[in-house]
Amino acid sequence: MAKKPKTSKSSTENASAVSALELEWEDIDPAFFAGARSQAPTYPIEVLPQRFGSTVSAVAQARCVNIDFVASSLIAIASGAVGNRVRLAITARRTEPGVIFMALVAEPGDGKTEAFDIARECFNSIESLPGPGRSSTNALQPDDPVMMKVEQQRNLAARKKLAIDGVAPVDGTMRQVTSANKRKLLLSQATVAGIRDGLVSSPEGRVFLADELINVMNITSGQDRIGARTLLLEAFEGKPHVISNARDGEIEIEALQLTILGGTQPDRVGLLLGNAHDGMAPRFLWCAPDVVRFDDIADSDGPMDDLILALGRLADIVPRGLPGAYPALIEISKEAREIVREANSDWNAQLRIAPRVMKSLLARARTQALRLSMNLALCERALAGEELPGGEITGEDVQRGIALMNRYYLPMGERVITEISKLDPEPPSVQLARHLARMKKPVINVRDDIRRGPGSPLRDPDEIEQNLEELRLRGLVKSQIRARASGGRPTTDWLVNPKLFKLQA
């Protein structure tokens, strides 16, 4: 048994002295360090379906990643796995794809890279999973027993139908997944040619996974950047599309449909959006949380195996009719339609007085809510081992999508577009306060610690004096005149509020 470290009398006295000293100082307002940025909405984990929400929580805790990033990433991963294999039946002629464009916004080291690693792991595993009824050559990727059972039942039903019609089944006509027709999910090239080549033979849709959205949206360089950006925006709708060029003529894409999961840093959001009027901002669901840092490192992967098997079930949903006929359709219940109508009435009321950028977010709220509802419902059914795509979208399903929009993705979108994309550099007073917090010195000297101090953000004496005065008025520092031992003019040191050090911690 390890012995407890001894606490000396002097250290106890010092701690008491520090506590007494803190009582002499006023509390520090943390908002001073946040500038004008509002507090991020809390992710409503309780809104998610039971199995999906438990999976999100378990993976986030095991991998030490902010729950906002994990939940948003897994929703996008589910959308990518489903692709164009299932759509919502809005009317007899109109359908709604489950496409999700998800953007994670965070500083380097805040956890979005870990969220992308989870996504890559899922997508790579889905592509390598064997299809139903097909033996695996990789011991690490066993057959999915749930999908094996579903496939056996499906093949049995098909054989019975053939028997009723008086047709004998031919070996090999039952649905199988081979290396030739296995799904390829990830798309690497965000150029017009790359999108064309990736989708021309992929009616099930593809996925962009990019750590930096600016590169995916192709707005930094390239002659066809406008065309590629326009093509990506149209890929949100999943409609047939024809691309023409002089060399190849007209090339028809059966379904221009892409799921996007990308990230960017806060100071690049403005570059990504431009003037925010080309329709890109409302197509994305934005995730830019006030990141909670973890002291621990991950010691397990959480329920990743169960998640990957469920996502594999989504990727293997049978299209409508014969193989190659897309997509399967899922109905919206009468109750669900009424709930959506009421929510849309509220969004339309908000539109009347909303600023221009919020108008676009509100205008697409219904579409986004329906897509969230479908993907969450399908993922929950896959986690439960139910046959897919299953029955209609229920009122409870759409309530989840609406709640996610109202409580998280709409306020987060407004925060990203109106605040984060227009963030000014930190004021010098905030930079100076951060410098004092990092030093953790109870008394600082202007010349030694600021003008000549390593890492100091300020060097000009007048600027230092002006910003120290602001910090004094905010209760972060106090001036202390100290007489010189050798006589002469007294010097001024500054006492630093000890609560600043705790705030930094």
Image (cartoon, rainbow, N blue to C red):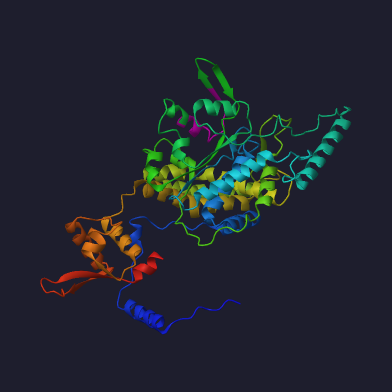
**Where is the N terminus found, in terms of image quarters?**
bottom right
Q: Tell me residue 70's x, y (percent).
A: 55, 52
Residue furthest out toward the bottom: 9
Instruction: Find the magenta span and give its range.
Output: 229-242
Horizontal side of residue 463 vs 81, given as left or right: left
Q: Tell me residue 397's x, y (percent).
A: 62, 51
Please name whichever residue, 314 or 327, is drawn nearer the observer in this view of the structure. Answer: 314
Q: Is residue 309 visible?
A: yes
Q: Tell me residue 475's x, y (percent).
A: 27, 69
Please name whichever residue, 16 or 283, is drawn nearer the observer in this view of the structure. Answer: 16
240 inside magenta stretch: yes
Horizontal side of residue 306 vs 135, given as left or right: left
Horizontal side of residue 329 vs 410, given as left or right: right
125 inside magenta stretch: no
Dividing the picture into quarters, in which one does residue 161 lie?
Answer: top right
**Where is the C terminus found, in terms of image quarters?**
bottom left
Dividing the picture into quarters, in which one does residue 467 lie?
Answer: bottom left
Q: Tell me residue 51's x, y (percent).
A: 66, 55
Horizontal side of residue 396 vs 289, given as left or right: right
Question: Looking at the image, which residue is at 30% across and 62% down?
Answer: 433
